[in-house]
Image (spheres, coloured by chain):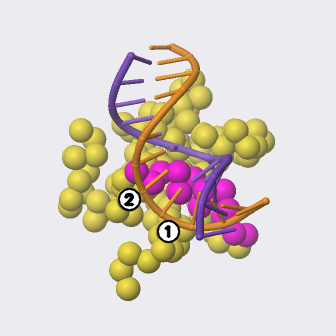
Chain colours: A yellow, B purple, C orange
Amino acid sequence: MDKLPNFYTRVYEFVGKVPKGCVVTYGQVALALGAPRSARAVGYALRNLPDGTDVPWWRVLNANGETSIQRISVTAADLQREILEYEKVNFRKGQVNLEDFRWFPKEFDEFSKKDYLE
DNA sequence: GATCTGACCACCG
DNA sequence: CCGGTGGCCAGAT
């Protein structure tokens, strides 16, 4: 029962674990799920995020620490930024300093946190 | 069932 | 610095 095609479920599960005041990147989520090059699928998962799922999608940013969502909805991008700032995640010139706010799960630093950063 | 596309990312020129 | 390209996964047509 490993490696299910339920990529979405894993994405939601992972994002759901991100604590308040922290952020993760699409590529990071993909890597944590065992698919280093599937960041796009992560984005797609969040785009098709079903209603009713309390997933903190706003804590997911692109590799630059920016909100990629503005491509499909500017208002949503605004909302995302508002929420993050409310959670004390500071934006500098429209970006978040990932050095300060990036979050890693426990399992993650077992195998390749360092690897990822290099 | 083939092809396109996407809230992405890294690499190359 | 910017644009193009390949790579990955899943949904849409």
Q: Is residue A70 visible?
A: yes
In this figure, what is the number of numbered marks?
2
Local SS, label 1: helix
Label 2 CA crowd tier, 10 Å (few <14, some 14–19, many 20+): some
Q: Nearer the viewer, residue A101 or C4?
A: C4
Mark 2: which secondary structure?
A: loop
Q: Which residue is mark 1?
A: A7
The residue lying at 69 percent from left, 38 percent from top is A70
Give left or right: position of A30 versus A60. left
Q: Nearer the viewer, residue B10 or A29?
A: B10
Residue A10 % position (x, y): 47, 70
Against C3, residue A75 (above or below) is below
Label 1 crowding class (10 Å Cα cut-off): few <14, some 14-19, many 20+? some
Q: Are marks 1 and 2 in contact (CB under 8 Å)?
A: yes
Q: Which residue is mark 2?
A: A35
The percent coordinates of residue A74 (x first, y second) are 76, 38
> Residue A110 shows which numbered tag?
none
> Of helix, strand and loop, which mostly describes the magenta segment?
helix
A42 vs A4: above or below: above
The residue marked by circle 2 belongs to what chain?
A: A
Do we see residue A23 in this rendering?
A: no
Residue found at x 38% / y 85%? A1
- Mark toward the start of the polypeptide (1 vs 2): 1
Residue located farthest toward the bottom when viewing the structure as drawn: A1
Which amino acid does the dot numbered 2 rest on?
Answer: Ala
Q: In the rendered structure, which amino acid carries the disc numbered 1?
A: Phe
Q: Quadrant of the C terminus of chain A?
A: top left
Where are the magenta residues, as a range?
A37-51
Question: Quadrant of the rendered structure where residue C12 is?
Answer: bottom right
Instruction: Using the image, determine if residue A60 lies above or below residue A78.
Output: below
Q: Callout 1: residue from which chain?
A: A
Q: Position of residue A31 (x, y in %)?
A: 36, 55
